Amino acid sequence: MPLPADTTLNDRYTIRRTLDPGGEDAGDAGLAAGAFATVYLADDSDGDAAAILTEYVPAALSERTDDGELTPRDGREELFEQGMTLFRKETGMLREIDHPNLAHPIDDFRARGTAFRAGVHPAGASLAGALQKNGGRIDEEAALEVMRPALGALHALHREGGVHAGFAPAAIYLTKKRKVLLRGFRGVQFQLARRMVRREVPGAEEALAEATIPGISPPEQSDSEGRRGPWTDVYAAAATFFRAVTGRRLPEVSANAPSEQDASEEPGQAEIAEALAGAEELSEELKPVLERALAQRPRGRLQSAQALLELLEDPSKLPEHSLSEGSRSEEPGAVELEDPEGAEGAGASAIAGAGASERDETRVEEAGEEDEGTWGPASIAAAAAEAARQEKEKARNQRKKREAEEGTRYEDDQPAARAGRRRGADDEDGDERLLPVSNRVAMGGGVAVLLVVAGLLFSGLLGGSTSSAEGSASARYERLVAEGDSLFEASAYQAAARRYREAEDLDIENAPGEGRVSERLLMIEQLQEAVEEENYRRAMTRGDSLMARAERLVDGENEFGESARLLFEQAREAYVTALSSRPDDSTALARVQSVRNTLNVGEEESGQQEDGETTLEEEQQLLFERYRDGGDEAFANENYEEARRQFNEALGYQPDNTYVQDKLEEIETRISEAQQQEQYRRYRRRADSLVEAGQLEAAKNEYQLALDVNPGDTAVTRRLDEIAERQEQQRERQEQYQLHRSRGDMRFSESNFQQAAASYRKALDQRPDDDYAQRRLREAEQRLAEAKQAAEDSANQQQTANQQQTADQQQAAEQQQAESQQAAGQEQTAGQQQQQTAQQGGGQEEPSESESKIYEVTDQQPKVVGGRSALYENISYPEEARQQGIEGRVFVRATIGKDGSVRNVKVQRGVGSGLDTEAARAVRNAEFEPAVVDGEPVAAYRTLMVRFQIE
């Protein structure tokens, strides 16, 4: 039962209403509500925005009282507490992760018997809600722009050892401020549900089922024995991408995913392949990527969110490899592992072939030669290199064919983006021409457009302006214009121009050159001209400054030295750069010629150039060759950073030169390999040291980072398996330790020192060196010893008192017996006299009971009405004796009148500590049947034994 509206929590949050993830809020909540949590929309008195409150409420383990408190169900207290601990730990981890696209909790607190997590709720909608209002789907480009930041946040979560377990369209939130947020974490749900299944808690199977998302979650997530990890979220992310682009769910596969050992077939993979093959909305290049990410067996799946993102951005990095072959092949000499974390999936950088050679040497050293066809780093590298070469050749051929048939649609002839190159002038959505020379650095369209597309998606989808993504030419025109406007506002002018040109082809209302789209294209052209003018001005200013410095140097030295020559050459480069912005500028041409004449002073130039264009081409060729040769020399000396700089300069003069392009690709690969392998070794060294120090969690993070660099590294996966096993053992020991320690503390507070000591001993079985348990055990044993000594002293004193009392009682009894015998003689005489008097017709009253005899021996003893059980029902165990563990028997003597009354109650022998008093009280308050002599009730003595024993 959720908390009611207007409930105030933590003196800060006031609940507005409960969010319904299965109803009207299905497109907005996405916050793991259901069998494990309740989600509220609340007002935050400390903030401007509304807040989302997630309350830990495991329905199968807890129930809410009438006053709103959440209490564990009987027998499920331990699981409830474990789940709450996991919930709070997850909250703490999320607060520590520094990623702009991860929804960070702003607060966590305990109230109403459970734990709460609070987060900001900005205006916006989930991807699920946006898709619903957009006809059910979006195109690949828009989906990728939304998935890029979401996958980045997911990768950051994985680096901290977390698993999302709920990645889906509902977990991706698009704010009105054009930001993508990942939320809806279900890791705790999945973990707690598995524990419930293992302990056979009623409703556990239903809880496990609710922790999964149909058509999104991988098979292992619905299996209580399934191993989860980053690969779990990779599957869900790929399924989410499929859902966003096609508008359909993937087929649900059997929860009984194939084991890692049984690789003869993969149930469910055929259905996945069929769904991908029939998805006309997906490009053919992306289908193999998604098939790999959606592998039913975790080993055959991509192992990181970064790997999936890289392949979605550049499918050519995926090697040609059969999924079924990959899942059946084994690592040479590798041990069969249950943990799919060791699967040889395509990693973040290894997919591009980075680090292949060194990893191959490591694998040969550890496991022998690599079998031909094995899915390993070497085959990844070879296949990736070949795929990249074929893709580049294919792109060039298509470009030439398109230009020959219809003319280029691009204003500047930029080569296609190349795998392995830095984002920048060659990126599809880059706008290198609009940047000053000094700022022509990596500014890919993906970075510039990242939040724009999310915002575009939000505004386009929530506004309901289109009924379908591809419904008609008019709808496509509106979408292209909206995209172009968003890109234009983000200063991604070249990408915006392409959208506008496509829209212009669909514009049937305006003549060519007219209308708003044409006006925007004209504005972009004017902006380009303005930037080119600025580039020209800066280059000329730099050239003039260098020229003046060189001339001053010559005048001062009266000779043409090397320093002056270097300055003149730099000036010439600046003037040539200016000519790239104004090819026919006479001033720049004249400056170039002047520098040339200065550099060739005293010599007659052979073959003067006939016009400025020939001079420019010659200058550009000379500069290109100089930088190219400098790059070759640096490359031969393995100075790759310098070689990259030289080749990049050369590429500025001949952007389409394939030799330089190939060299730059090779340099990037070698630099990346060297950096990655050095990083890999650093991670391994740190991880090994941390393992030796016993810091397993930190070591696990370092090994995972190493595995990100070298996916499929068997040595690292073995270490991760060992750490996981040790951590599981540690967790179990810690849980047992905490359980016994808590019980010990509770019993100690109740002064039950004997059971407290037993609990502390059990805690020390789990953590033998624990100072706290050792100290508390000593205290409990000391208290026990003190109680035992006190009991012994009390018993001795009581025994002495009892012995004296017994002697007194014996003396009194003997005296009383003598008196009784004397009274009996007198009674007999009196009886005879009474008889004589009766015979004489006289009569007297019977003597009172006080004057009658009190019998020691009777025909029938006095009895407790209801038996001894009735006597014990009236006895309460004294608390002092219970706390000290005192037990024993108390003997009580009383006089029972012939009417059943109780008098003269005395303790003959006891044990003290309140037991004697309680026994006497019970006898005094008991109801008796009197003794019988000759069939008549008489007064008699009765001694009863009362036993005290702690159950």
Image: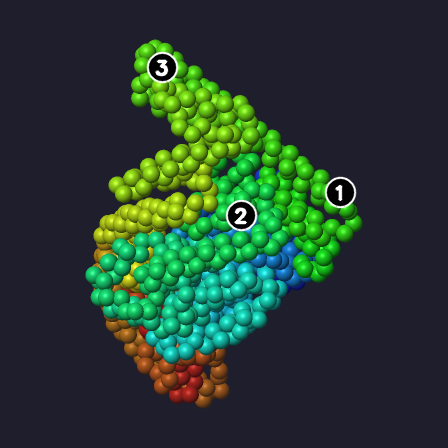
Q: CA distance from mark 3 to mark 1?
A: 57 Å
Residue in the picture at 56% in, 42% down: 412
| Residue assigned mark 1 | 514
- Within-10-Å neighbours for mark 2: few <14, some 14–19, many 20+: some
Whole-angstrom CA distance, mark 2 to mark 1, is: 27 Å
How far across and down, in percent of the image, does residue 16 sit? 66, 50
* Quadrant for the N terminus in the image: bottom right
Q: Is residue 823 left or right of residue 119?
A: left
On the image, the x and y values in percent for residue 39 come to 58, 56
Amino acid type assigned to the residue bearing label 2 in the image: Glu
- Residue at the location (35% across, 49% down)? 666
Which residue is at a point 43% across and 19% down the rendered structure image? 547
Element marked by disc 3: helix
Q: Which residue is mark 3?
A: 553
Q: Which mark is residue 916?
A: none
Between tags 3 and 2, which lies in front?
3
Earlier sequence position, callout 3 versus callout 2:
2
Q: Give the colour scheme shown.
A: rainbow
* Amino acid found under the numbered disc labelled 1: Glu
Which is nearer the eye, 602 or 346? 602
Please give the name of the residue rendered at 74% of the width and 45% of the height, measured from the top-left corner. 512
For residue 22, what is the image quadrant? bottom right
Q: Residues within 10 Å of mark 1 (few under 14, many from 20)?
A: few
Circle 2 residue: 428
State if disc 1 and disc 2 touch (CB < 8 Å): no
